[in-house]
Amino acid sequence: MKLSSKSWYGVRLMTALASAGREQPLSLRQAAQQLEISPKYLEQIVSALTKNGLLTGIRGTQGGYLLSEPPQSIRLGDIIRATDGCILSADCPQKDKERSESLASDCGWRQFFHAVEAAADSITLADMIKERDK
């Protein structure tokens, strides 16, 4: 399994926001500098996360982005689905429904896909921060 760069940076952004707390918004420019990513590319990621209800945008000179929910309510799987549309591309119906149905029904693939998705959904941002800070 290979995560896309959108998912990778999405997780890094969400972790940075979770670490900073929910009071002080992080501007797109600050986040791009912190993550060492182009502001244009980060804008696409932020747009997907906002559209999926994971981020809230604050307008104005002191504006930026905040987590929409507490870190313990946001799961790794939520971030990956927001940025990529699915966790495993072979199990992603919008990419190739017929192929994914065939793969998912053969030789235990369905179990594998569900196990990976369950693992991603069992990890919260709070868990990731706790693990990082050990």
Image (cartoon, rainbow, N blue to C red):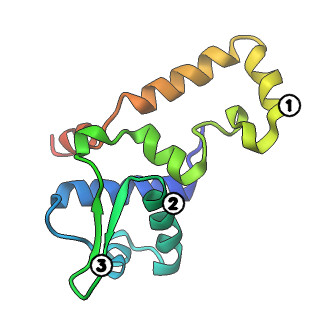
Residue 9 visible in image: no
Q: Residue at x 39, y 74 (%)?
A: 36
Instruction: Tell me if 123 is positioned left or right of 5 in this view.
Output: left
Q: Could you tell me which secondary element the residue under label 1 belongs to?
A: helix
Element on which disc 2 rests: helix
Disc 3 versus disc 2: distance between alpha carbons? 18 Å
Q: Secondary structure beneath disc 3?
A: helix
* Residue indicated by mark 1: 98
Answer left or right for 131 relative to 122. Answer: left
Which residue is depicted at the point 30% across and 80% down? 59
Looking at the figure, which quarter contains the N terminus? top right
Residue beneath the point at 51% across and 60% down: 48
Residue at numbered disc 3: 30
Mark 3 vs 1, N-terminal side: 3
The structure residue drawn at horizontal position 31% and vertical position 37%, both measured from the top left corner, is: 124
Q: Residues within 10 Å of mark 2 (few under 14, many from 20)?
A: many
Classify residue 128 by image quadrant: top left
Q: Horizontal and vertical percent for residue 132?
A: 23, 45
Labels 3, 2: front one: 2
- Name the amino acid type tagged 1: Glu
Residue to which mark 2 is pinned: 48
**Residue furthest to the bottom:** 61
Q: Quadrant of the C terminus?
A: top left
Q: CA distance from mark 3 to mark 1?
A: 43 Å
Tell me whether circle 3 and circle 2 mark residues in contact (CB < 8 Å).
Answer: no
Compare marks 1 and 2 and give the one earlier in the sequence. 2
Please report whichever mark, 3 or 2, sits nearer to the chain's N-terminal start. Answer: 3
| Residue type beneath disc 2 | Ala
Q: Position of residue 34 (x, y in %)?
A: 31, 72
Front residue of 64 and 88? 64
